[in-house]
Amino acid sequence: MSQIILDSRQRKIISILCNETDFITISKIAKVVDVSSRTIARAMDPIEKWFAENDSRLIKKTRVGLKIDATLEERNKILEVLNEEDIYKIYSPEERRLIMSLELLEKKKITKLLYFSNYFKVSNSTISKDLDVTEEWLKKYNLELIRKQGYGITIHGQEKNFRKAIINLLYDNTKVYELGKMLKTTVKQSGTPTDTTKEVRKRLLNLIDQTTLITLEKILDEGEKHLNYDLADSAYIGLLVHLSIAIKRISNDEKIVIDSDYLRGLKKSNEFSVAKLIGEKISNAFSIDIPESEIGYITMHLKGAKLRNGNFSSGNLLGENESIIGNYQLSKIVLKMLDEIKLLSGYDLKDDKKLLIGLISHLRPALSRIQMKMEIRNPLLKQVKNNYPEIYAMSNEAVKVIEKWIGMKIPDSEIGFVAMHIGAALESRKMLNSKKYNIIVTCSSGMGTSSLLASKIAKEYKNIKILASSSTRNLDKLVKENTIDFIISTVAIDSVKVPYVKVSPLLLEKDKKIISALMAEISIPDRKDYRVLEKTELKGRIDFQKLNESIYKIINNLFFIEALEVTNKKALIEWIGNTLGKGHEIMSQSIKNTLFNREYIESTIVTEENILLLHGKTKIYEELTFGVIRLKNGIHEVNYHDESIEIKNVIVMLAPEDASHYEIDTLSYISKSLIDRESFVKSLVNDGKESFKENLITVLNDYMRERIV
């Protein structure tokens, strides 16, 4: 056997040379070994001597490389000799720190500095520097590294923190899929690492005993049958890891403690009885005493799994129920968080429903986990911090709203998840706002459904400028006079070269998808003059007399009918035509034709109150009219979701075909109020005629102020 002791790196270089039949450069070897060319050059002198001792010769050629002067059979013999010899292992600083951390955490005893120096074949100074890094890492788990000259090294702290640190070492240094595979099958199937990595992996996997796992799986499977929900894979693996480490620690007389008041609260849950059953089976299987504090921690894992599955019951923040916060309360907190995000980013995300639902869905169980001192793992946390530092910093500020409210610190892992939600919303908003669109909103009359739709669009899209809300008859003129990117219409249109989409007046989710698809297709220049729904052309050159006249006509012609008995929409329109026509057959028929024609195109059902809007322009009937009809017995209609619904409230809006710009604009403003003003809609549905009339006058007064100011 050779007198020269090789380290792991030199052994690997020899292996590379034996597997190469031609010359190989030092730089190529360095790339394979993942070190510098200078490091390889320094390692070559002992290698040459080793080859000489083993009757082999290393050929070196400048600018060509290195090659072993040996046949294939001789190369194989070299590898056999290499495998028989002892190897001096070289550990990376990360591997040294990991092995030292495991040793100190597991054994929980005093260890001399010299022990580690001899083990790793490095100086005391190197070990001391490694321990400086380890000390900072331990602080994250409220553990203290004690170092005293002549005394040695040890770790002080609570048992729960020891376990948390050990489990995190396992998770942080073992791939999730390997861990899952190992827990569900055998340690042998989890891979065969090499060299120093093999030793590190072996140490990690030794944290969990194979035989213990098999028994625990049977116990846990039996316990799961007593729950009213299934454990997700992540929760199942987490509990197995916790229990296997707990058994090892209890066997070494390392007991965990739990707050007595908190334990009393856990005892009231169904999960505690299941945890007690699991504890009893573990006690019998492993001949160890499972204290009540351990049962408490098993309960917390089971409750945590329940929260991840989205199973909640109602309760107050400090109550014992799984849900610690109501949806209404949490919604208010999330909105305050988004106020902070707006201050920091300049983007108002409070109208982003997807973001609101996402944050509420995550924070609801997260706050319960935090209360139980259970920190969820976030495998993307490092990536989020490194790649999106500004978003993480903003999220860190935003969660202070929650911290102040619950009086507890939000852990980095949870902030990371909040940052992922915020980041996705900000990216979506930035991308959406990178293009600015000029559009026209249109319907057949230009006063009813187009106004409802325009109001919805103004709220939904911050990068759309609505140049006009118009009837289809005026489209050609508007397209010629303005730069239009596309048209959004409530009716089918033709003979217009500008792209258009047909949507419902209530802007349903499917409509938004159609609009977004069209916006993505359209290539337009960047515009700086975009704004949301502007005031119409009336502003700036007001004819006060005509403005007052249009408002007066609507108030004067207001009709309000209670408990009208009709059996269907046809009978309803017949009644409206006959009543407003006042016995004038041609006028009555004109009203009926207007309403029937509009309904033939599509019904307009407004808001969640299921209000039917009957509207249009008449050729003979010349009164500007607004009316409310309440039906004694509802009539059934199909809404925009293709659902059969009951209609009990009806709005009627009629204007003469030659109505002025002011008259159409006034009716349009009332239509828009059905979307913008909840109080106006409630009054329309619930109040008597006089109270409703007062609300209508308030709306019209606001309309006048907006036009004048």
Image: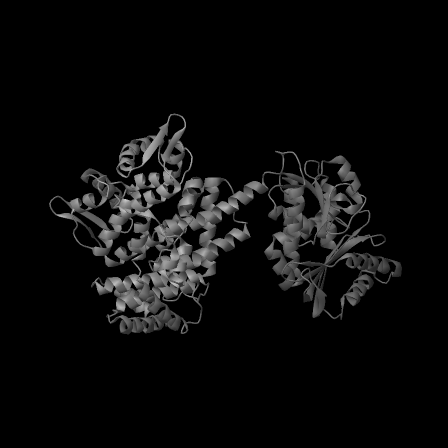
Most foreground residue, 671 or 368 = 368
Closer to the camera, 254 or 517?
254
Query: Could you tell me residue 122's position as x and y percent?
Result: 22, 40
Furthest residue to the right?
A: 586
Query: In which quarter of the view is residue 88 placed?
Result: top left
> In the figure, 703 relative to 218: above or below?
above
- 698 left or right of 198? right
Which residue is drawn at the image coordinates 75% and 58% (left, top)?
602
Q: Residue at left 27%, top 74%?
A: 284
Give the residue at x 76% y 35%: 481
Left or right: residue 441 compared with residue 97 = right
Residue 518: % across, % down: 67, 45
The image quadrant of residue 681 is bottom right
Residue with the most extreme top position: 62
Q: Is residue 684 above or below residue 495?
A: below
Residue 551 in sight from this viewpoint: no
Viewer-nearest residue: 193 or 103: 193
Is 445 left or right of 135, judged from the image as shown?
A: right
